[in-house]
Amino acid sequence: MQDHQQRMSGSQRRLWWVLFVIGLALSLLMVSRTRFDGDQFNMLARGWTLAFAGEWLQYGMPTSAGGMSPGGLQSLLVGLPLMVWADGRAATLLLWLMSVVGYLLLDRAFGPALGPRGRLLLALFYWLNPWRMHYTSMLWNSSYMFFFGAAHALCSVHMRRARRFWPSLVMVLCVGLGLELHTAALALAFASVLLWWRGVIRVSWWGVAAGCLLVVASVVPWMAAVAARPDLLPGGPGFPFRNLVLVQPFLRGLMYLLRYPSLALPSRVYDLDLAPDGSADDALSSTLQVILVGLGWITVLLPVVAYRRFLRAPRALLRRQPSTVGRRAWLRQYAFWTLAGAVVAFAISPTSVMFWQGFPVLHVAVLPVVLLVQALLRSGRAVAGRRAVAAVAGTGLAVNLLIGWASPMFRPPGPLRSGGSGTEASFVRLLAADHPMFHDLSLHERCGLVVVDQGGWMPDLWRVREPDGGTAASESPHHQ
């Protein structure tokens, strides 16, 4: 009997629980230490407006193409937790809980095809992945995409052999509601079309119609808001297929798919400060940063090898498969066409591809690595493979601990220094004016905020509008 057809042994089940609990504990530590920057303040402003001012805004966050994302879902996801606990971390806890549910959905969806070893490797390369751990432990609208990507995957599994109403409906909701939070959900939209076109999933058109009806109903209030304020519609610079024309942004998007299963996180994540109350850039922190950045790019070699192996038989991935195809072969096709959907989204994006645009498919980006390592463990090099996996697990846990303690989004703000350097200087610390939200949610203390006469920042909802449509306060530092 093949590995993926077996049930977990007692020792394997205990190991899975150990990995799961470690991930829970580490991510909860990060949530408890999370701080807030410009994007987070903008999200909290929408939630505060619902929870404290009683107004449900029918538009979300500013988009890269200008305007605001449609719908009032963002206000609900932030505002409802604030009604229970008046702390910015309340909304972060909900996001964290959604990420936990998302992983359990993935384990349920992929477990039968991956088998016991594959489930453990999925826990290692996805659940304990520093990319996922970092971005689902901080409040950020693109971080919701991990949950929607996982729910989309489970729907795909249920639509593998038959046209089913409810999975089809939920898949449409994953795309539609996801787009209300972040345009990165376009990757799921194109993946859905490609999966249906190649026969990887069977679609119930009644379910699709019902899902579309619910999505349209959710944005009807936004349409009314747009009629009153046309500036809510996107209208910024850029053009479709810009990234294919310029090439480099498109190649960068492809590179992100290779970076997701590795330790090559954005440079700001590794801008560590082990003692934020002391010197700004101590030697140990700087040395660790150099080591982690170098180690991160070295670990990209594993995904490169895994993707080369994954794509070595393209005809099997491209051809349409009958509904009776095995779980393993189906999973490979699902992964291929979902990644293809992300590539299409990268290509047509009117703005440069950024790392968060692949978050909806990060669970798929790690699958080639899971399949490669699983094959190595089944081979004659099993002992060496186990040692390598143990080394990867230990390194990943150490990196997660360092991030949770000293990375910019999880360390205390430290003293406000004039002429400071590094990411601490780019954090929102200076406010153009005070506002009740900063007191109601205890943000002054957690983020070290100071009100100044000139050069301060304010959330986009409360900036002074100028006649040309601009704002008097400066924009938020972009989270790179």
Image (cartoon, rainbow, N blue to C red):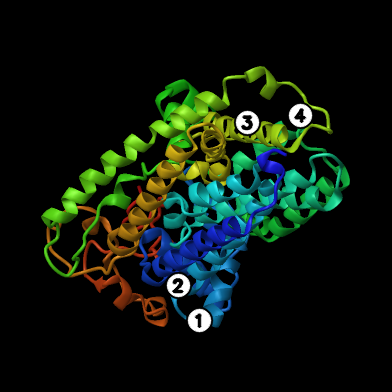
Q: How many marks?
A: 4
Cα distance, mark 2 to mark 1?
A: 8 Å
- Residue at label 1? 85
| Type of amino acid at the residue the image marks with label 1 | Trp
Q: Secondary structure at mark 3?
A: helix
| Distance Cα–Cα, label 2 vs label 3 | 36 Å
As shown in the figure, which amino acid type bears the numbered disc 2?
A: Arg
Quadrant in the picture for the N terminus: top right
Q: From this viewpoint, is residue 209 visible?
A: yes
Lower sequence index among marks 2 and 3: 2
Residue 336, labelled with which disc?
A: 3
The foreground one among 347 and 288 is 288
Give the alpha-carbon distance from disc 4 to disc 3, as whole Å. Answer: 13 Å
Ranked by sequence position, the earlier of labels 3 and 1 is 1
Q: Label 4 amino acid?
A: Trp
The residue positioned 76% from the left and 29% from the top of the image is 197
Q: Please report the residue visible at 71 percent of the width from the left and 59 percent of the height from the top.
A: 218
Image position of 256 with respect to 38: above or below: above
Q: How many residues crowd mark 4 within 10 Å: few (<14), some (14–19), many (20+)?
A: few
Question: On the image, numbered disc 4 is attached to which residue?
Answer: 197
Q: Residues within 10 Å of mark 3 (few under 14, many from 20)?
A: many
Q: CA distance from mark 4 to mark 1?
A: 46 Å
Which mark is in front, 4 or 3?
A: 3
Q: Is residue 86 above or below residue 8?
A: below
